[in-house]
Image (cartoon, helix red, strand yellow):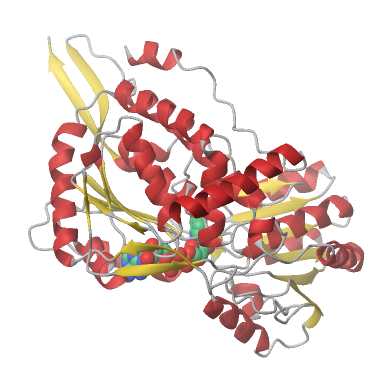
Amino acid sequence: MTQTMLAGLLPFEHEPYHRYSDPTVAEAQRAAFRSVREQHVGRTLPLIIGGREEHGDGTTAVRNPADTRETVWYAQNATPDQLERAVQAATDAFEEWRYSDPLQRASIFKRAATLLRARRLEFNAVMTLENGKNWTEADGEVAESVDHFEVFAREALRWAQGKPVAPMPDEHVTTVYEPLGVVACISPWNFPSAIPLGMALGAIAAGNTVIWKPAPETPLSSYLLVELLFEAGLPRGVIQFLTGTNDVLGDPLVDHPRVRMIAFTGSKAVGCRIYERAARVQPGQTWLKRVIAEMGGKDPTVVCADADVDAAALGIVQAAFGYSGQKCSACSRVIAEADVYDDLLEKVVSLTRTLRGGLPEDNADLGPVIHERSAERIMAALAGKHGDARLVLGGDRPDTGERTGGYVSPTILADVAPGDSLFQEELFGPVLTFTRAESWEHAIALANDSEYGLTASFYSRDPAKIAAARQRMHVGNLYVNRKCTGALSGTHAFGGYGMSGTNAKVGGPDYLFWFLQTKTIAQRY
Ligand code: NAD
């Protein structure tokens, strides 16, 4: 039957981006900012537990990172008792949702896709005001969220079909997939729409219930998605929306004996902590917890001597400085063969000089990093000892007048040694290093010289080198002759190797398996 249901869904097409070069579209985006400011600035978001809105114990202010003098909205601080009740509510709701019809789940996601399509500009504006993405970046992410709805609608139906096994003459044998239980979804601020949504849809599509815990910096992008899912018909008990401080929603949520799985995306430090804590069986716990932990990156671009240097330079600048380098997939290391090194460096520097700094709300190319303290951390890292490395561009903080925020100039350093902390540690800001390779094989070896393995780009015109790179580059997402950012749901399943995490590959054909357990049923006729 599900075979027929799946056949009923047309092939999936990616959501197109807005063309802001069209003045009408640009004006519509400006109008969306005005309307979001009128509707949301100054409001306090509720918690949602068991379908009901609640206040917590005090609130946390959300600041506009582009000008931290402005508080945009407030989120509740959930209490330990509210965490307890949220886990209970999710446990109760699971008893019904686990048996829900996969076509019902798919229909809700399809309807949510339609609702979000109609409100994309509004969701873009909310994101810009809470995490400092410019229009283009916010638009890309909200489009990805629409894609997620479409992809997960199909995945819910596909996994409901089970898998074929070798038949027996006197037994009916099936392999079916069942949900796990309560899934805690813990997300970062840099993709406040697509990342929590991807994890939550994975859980819900599989028949689990969710504790949705957004990053403290970006609660409204999440809250609006939760409301949208309810409007699309999701039973309100299926998602508990909790905001608050890490002392209540960090370790206690991870350790809770009735949380069956943790789906986390964020830093290596927090991901490792969660992985370790979740391994400990708590009193009263009757399962081994499942953990997805998608973590950081130190993503390289390799440029071979035979590469199209102009194409490489453009891809590098887009991937390194888009959203001020605050993507886990951002290019932070360029490794180039000596023959093209100087030419490439010059081209990257001159393209970077054309980037326009300013307010994300005005769609400037380069906005702030998320916090003042992040900017200070980046400056401290640059100030350390870096051997023979040469500062070629930036390395300072631009003058932004009265506007306060973590603004950092786009920074390029040449001749950075592989052992240098700038080559090895994730900085999460607009900082790019260049390292010279003796050969293309040496360049691949340098690219792999990292504990991370998230994304990488490889530029060459030589099919033999490309074939070698495809086999030897140790990353979850390898891009050949294109930039290393911009994964599309349903096409570029996303997730890394090594210390970049568990390689769950959101948006890919195997993602839902992480949220399921497998039952084999053998029945004598
Ligand atoms: P973070 O690890 O500081 O926070 C992520 C989330 O974890 C937040 O919601 C935070 O409140 C929560 N948290 C903090 N302490 C916790 C604890 N002890 N237990 C449970 N939860 C806790 O990360 P961030 O600064 O929000 O995000 C940036 C990081 O995320 C970067 O390292 C980036 O590379 C990574 N990231 C990875 C991917 C990926 O797909 N691999 C995608 C986006 C971002």
Image-based side of 217 in relation to 48, left or right: right
User: Can the viewer see residue 370 in this picture?
Assistant: yes
User: Quarter holding the N terminus?
Assistant: top left
Does 331 sit above or below residue 400? above
Q: Which image quadrant is residue 238 in?
A: top left
Image-based side of 142 in relation to 233, left or right: right
Of 53 and 214, the residue lying toward us? 53
Does 408 sit above or below residue 115? below
User: Quarter holding the C terminus?
Assistant: top left
Image-based side of 133 in relation to 59, left or right: right
Does 448 sit above or below residue 147? below
Of 207 and 83, the residue lying toward us? 83
Of 220 and 329, the residue lying toward us? 220
Q: Position of residue 359 (x, y in %)?
A: 67, 63
Does 294 sit above or below residue 412? above
Residue at image position (61%, 45%) is 31
Residue reaching furthest to the left? 284
Residue reaching furthest to the front? 38
Q: Position of residue 172 (x, y in %)?
A: 20, 14
State the count of labels: 0
Residue at image position (12%, 56%) is 285
Image-based side of 518 in relation to 497, left or right: left
Residue at image position (29%, 67%) is 250
User: Can the viewer see residue 476 in this picture?
Assistant: no
Q: Quadrant of ligand 1?
A: bottom left
Q: Position of residue 137 (x, y in %)?
A: 63, 51
Q: Position of residue 104 (x, y in %)?
A: 30, 23
Of 58 and 381, the residue lying toward us? 58
